[in-house]
Image (cartoon, helix red, strand yellow):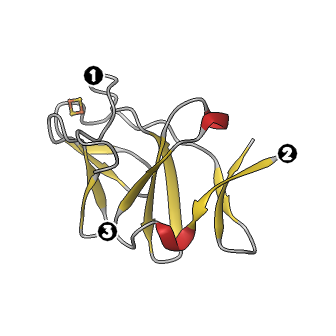
Amino acid sequence: MSTTPLCALADVPDGGARVVDATAAGVPVVLVRRGEQVWAYANRCPHFSVPLDFEPGDVLCYRGQVLMCAHHSALFRFEDGHCIEGPCAGASLDAVEIAVDDDAWVVLNR
Ligand code: FES
């Protein structure tokens, strides 16, 4: 398996999100972080298959628990990308396989 560095863990706001260009993943990726835990999803809302951010890179998060699609306010859990509220409730974001390496970089696993 090869890995591709995406960004430093410290560059993902704790309790927030960061959108990274991940050519190797085939789509832009949104990283969400809670403490030392980080998860990655394709930046594509299952409702209308559009990016979750309205202004590029500006992904709204609440209480370090959920991120919100900027278009119709669907809420997705950090830990599994499951939509808990909104027009696509029950759907999920597409997970992207990542890890945090020994240098505290978030890397894409391919
Ligand atoms: S496009 Fe995301 S909630 Fe409608």
Type of the residue with mark 3: Gly
For ligand 1, which image quadrant applies?
top left
Q: Note whether ligand 1 is within 8 Å of mark 1.
A: yes
Element class at badge 1: loop
42 sits to left or right of 72:
right
**Residue 51 x/y as whole percent:** 33, 33
Type of the residue with mark 1: Phe
Element class at badge 2: loop
26 sits to left or right of 64:
right
Type of the residue with mark 2: Met
Q: Which mark is residue 1?
A: 2
Q: Which mark is residue 24?
A: none
Q: Which residue is mark 1?
A: 48
Q: Do the CB atoms of the residues marked 3 and 2 lie less than 8 Å apart?
A: no
In what quadrant of the picture does the C terminus appear? top right
In what quadrant of the picture does the N terminus appear? top right
Q: Callout 1 environment at 10 Å: few (<14), some (14 to 19), or many (20+)?
A: few
Q: Which residue is mark 3?
A: 64
